[in-house]
Image: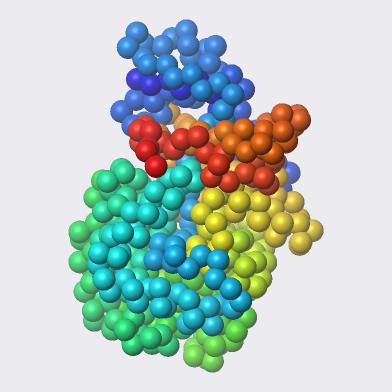
Amino acid sequence: MQAIRASVLHCLADPGEAGRKDAWEYFDDGMLLVDGGRIVDAGDAGRLLGALPANARVRDLRGKLIVPGFIDCHVHFPQLDIIGSYGEQLLDWLSRYAYPAESRFADAGHAREVAQSFVTELLRNGTTTALVFGTVHPHSADAIFEAAEARGMRLIAGKVLMDRNCPEDLRDDPDSAYADSRALIERWHGRGRLGYAITPRFALTSSEAQLEAAGRLAREFPDVWVHTHLAENLEEVEAIARQYPDSRSYLDVYDRFGLLREKSVFAHCLHMDAEDRSTMAAKGGAAAFCPTSNLFLGSGLFRLTAMRDAGVRCGLGTDVGGGTSLSMLRTASEAYKVLHLQEHALPPMQALYLATLGAAEALYLEDKIGNFRPGREADFVVLDYAGSSLTARRTAAAEGIEEKLFALMTLGDDRNVTSTWVAGVEQVV
Ligand SMILES: [Zn+2]
């Protein structure tokens, strides 16, 4: 058994806009007990030290803060090398930057190299689980799964489906999309901690025949995820309305093809009405809130309060390369600003929830990850208040864990990650 002594913080529920204090637990002189890759207990060091078994190894990290491993609900690993590309909104950004980068993934060796770097970057930022887009090439999914498996990570990914409105060399077709996805599901879904996501890029780049094939897969494999984009950009929403004139809304397009169900995760969800929100909640779909991407691409503001009030499961996503950072601390900071612009609040504990337990709920993994209840998988991150000289000064002047956490989110990044642990194993990054 391992016993790690540090401050320990985790969420038990959504603290909401009021930052409810009964929704999270904090142990200033705390301890996390880990055995066999799982959480045994989390609590006050004084209580747990007295009952430690004789063979327990105690690691003293006092002064640091342990939180559950961050969960990124939406990210594209093939876009790592075009993060921070200048000057376009969604549709032009895809053509100018994303598609050329994804074309390079025809080379399986390139895919493997980027996948290794991507997984290392996730861990460097304290992210232990992610829902990941590949490219249209089936070997892109193999590459990210192999990289995650080598680390023992709980990671979900899929090969992209797209057969229209995109470059010729990035197209599959309805039959190959079905056959390749099916083969990947059979190879990877449920292998160790890995999971598969059926991944149509968005309704604009899939024919109706392909969306039908995706829906058929979703019915045949109810346990796999569905991962796509929804209502990110106004020009995109207008194009969808022209392409699918019989659908009530963009969400309705996915719903008609059987792609709105439990374990369906939709990135962005910016331009939706109340009926869409209640439909999404009723059918168990989830939203990935990607603030750095939404601001960077000029897409719009996510209505977190309305989504949560409607009962939609929500988690944070980085959406790299449209997003500008793999750090969930940086992402939480931008989420705060997005809420502020809409005259709402995002208390630090709710931001932590969206990056951990809330994200686990969005992925239907809350019985496995997201907090430190006994029996959960031991994915966690050790944060360092003194990761930069400025965070050291600011957190030293802070009163209480909420103020300290907010300062870490506002000023911190990967410099504030001391170590990242996957299933109880400290990762070398
Ligand atoms: Zn995306």
Quarter of the image that includes the N terminus? top left
**Residue nearest the viewer, comparing 110 with 17:** 110
* Up-down relation of residue 429 to residue 221 (above or below): above
Q: Could you tell me residue 78's position as x and y percent?
A: 39, 66
From the top left corner, tell me how far across and down residue 55 is, in percent: 32, 12
Find the residue positioned furthest to the right: 343
Query: Which residue: 34% across, 8% down?
Result: 54
Nearer to me, 55 or 254: 55
Q: Is residue 47 visible?
A: yes
The residue positioned 25% from the left and 64% from the top of the image is: 109
Residue 292, picture quadrant: bottom right
Quarter of the figure with residue 291: bottom right
Answer above or below: position of 368 versus 113. Answer: above
Q: Residue at 51% across / 23% down in the picture?
A: 61
Q: How is the image coloured?
A: rainbow
Q: Can residue 67 be spotted in the picture?
A: no
Q: Nearer the viewer, residue 90 or 44?
A: 90
Residue 320, horizontal then vertical, whole percent:
50, 62
Quadrant in which the C terminus appears? top left
Report the label total: 0
Residue at horizontal 24%, vertical 81%? 175
Residue 183 lies, in percent from the top left, at 20, 66
- Image: 245 above or below 44: below
Above-or-below relation of 208 to 197: below
